[in-house]
Image (cartoon, helix red, strand yellow):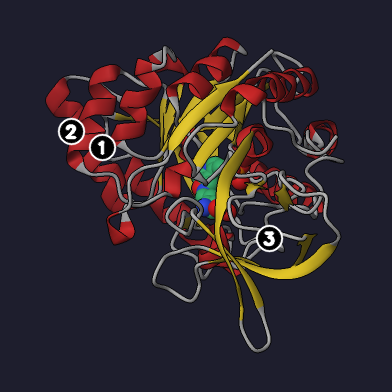
Amino acid sequence: MPFQLPAEFLNQPTPFYYYDLDLLDQTLSALTAAAKPGNFRVHYALKANSNLLVLERIRRAGLGADCVSGGEVARALEAGFGADDVVFAGVGKSDAEINLALAADIFCFNAESVPELRVLDELARAQGRRARVALRINPNVDAYTHPHITTGLDANKFGISLPDLAGVLEQLEQLPNVELLGLHAHIGSQITELSVFAALSRKLNDLQTWLEDRGYHLPHLNVGGGLGISYEQPDAYPIPDFATYFGLFEQHLQRRPGQQVHVELGRSVVAQCGTLLSRVLYVKESQHTRFAILDAGMTELLRPALYGSHHHIQNLSSQRPGLAYDVVGPICESTDTFGRARLLPETRRHDLLAIRSVGAYGEVMSSSYNLREKAAAVYGSK
Ligand code: LLP
C-alpha cells in the first residue's frame, strides 16, 4: 500500500515529520520475534531517532539503549530505559559525559583506545566505581556500503586495530578500576549484502580463540548494528529482514556457553515508520530541467545532500500523468536536492509530497541552517 497521510494531519503546516507508530510496533514485534528473547540482547541505537514517544515504544518492546553522547544517555534514562540496559559508545567521550554515565552506573562503555581506557580508570576511581567496558575492535571487514558510513576498515578512525590488541590488553591489566566484559565491533551502516555479517562472525571467532589462548574468557560479545532497509521500495519492504540477519549470527558466530550476544540496531528499527511531508512552493521550468521546489530542504533531511542517498518520493495530491522533476529544497546550496529526474504525477504549487524512509537519521540530523525553524513531528496510530 502506498503511503497515505491520516486525514487529521492534512492541514498540518509543512514541512513536518510523520511517524507511523503502528508500523513501528509491527517492526519491533518482527525484531523481537527474530531475536528470540534470551538469544540476542538488542540495544536500539538512539542516534537514529531519539524522539521520546518513539523511545518509549522501543523500551516497552524490551530493547536496551545504545548511546553515543551524554545527551543520549540522559535521554535514554528519561525515556525509562534502566541504566543496566544502557551502553555508551563513541570514539571521543568527554570527561563530563563519562562522569554522567558512571554516576548512572550504566551497563557498559564501548571503549576505543588506551588513552580513553586510562581516563575511564581515573574517573571511575574518583567516583569509587569500576567502569565496565567492551573493547571496540576494528575487524577490518568490508561492509560494502557507502564510504561515508563504513566503519570497520583499517582506514577508519573507529576501534582498536587487531595488531594493537595485545598491547591494549597489557595496558588494561594496569587499570584496576576498569573491568573487561567483552568485545564490540561495528562494521558499517545500511548494509544490504548480509553475508558480511558471516565474515564478521568468523573474525570474532578467531579473535575469541586467540583471547582464550591468553586466558581471557569474555561473557559478552557485541556485534554492532548496520542492517539496511529498502529505500527504493518502502511499500514492498516496510519491515527489514531480521530473521536472515539474526540467522547469520546464529549460524556463524561460535558463542561460548553462557555468553550473551548483543546487537545495536538503529536504522532498521525506525527508518520506515518516518515520512517527511512537504508542499510544493513552485514548479520552475528552466532550459533543460523541470524543478519542483519544496518547502522542505536539507535542513529537514540531510542524507541526500550528504551521501547522495535515495529516498522514495510520492505526490499525495496528484493523479495527473507523470513528468520528470528535479525535486529540490529552498536552501542556498546546490546539494539541497532530494532527487534528480524523478518521475512524479504532474506536480503543481501546493501539492503535498511524501519523502519516505526518513525515520532514521532524518529529524536527528536536522539543522537550523538559513535560520530555519525546526519542523514539527506528529504521530499516528489507529
Ligand atoms: N553501533 C555503532 C557503533 C554505530 O556507529 C552505529 C551507527 C550503530 C550501532 C547503528 O547502526 P545502524 O543499525 O543504524 O546502521 N547518518 C548515516 C548513518 C550513520 C551511522 C553511524 N553509526 C546515514 O544517514 O546513513
The mark nearer the N terminus, 1 or 3, is 1
Position of 217 relative to 231 (above/below):
above
Corner quadrant of residue 209: top right
Residue at image x 78%, y 54%?
A: 232
Label 1: how many residues lie within 10 Å, few (<14), some (14-19) or many (20+)? many
Q: Quadrant of the N terminus?
A: top right
Residue at numbered disc 2: 123
What residue is pinned by disc 1? Answer: 120
Q: Is residue 160 left or right of residue 222?
A: left
Residue type, mark 1 in image:
Leu
Asked whether the residues under the numbered discs 2 and 1 touch, taking CB atoms below 8 Å apart as contact, a structural biologist would say: yes
| Quadrant location of the C terminus in the rendered image | top right
- Residue 11 position, x and y percent, is 54, 31
Q: Nearer the viewer, residue 188 or 200?
A: 188
Along the line of sight, which residue is nearer the eye, 319 or 67? 319
Q: Nearer the viewer, residue 87 or 350?
A: 350
Task: Decide: few, some or many residues near mark 3? Use Cα within 10 Å; few <14, some 14-19, many ≥20.
Answer: some
Closer to the observer: label 2 or label 3?
3
Report the residue marked by disc 3: 310
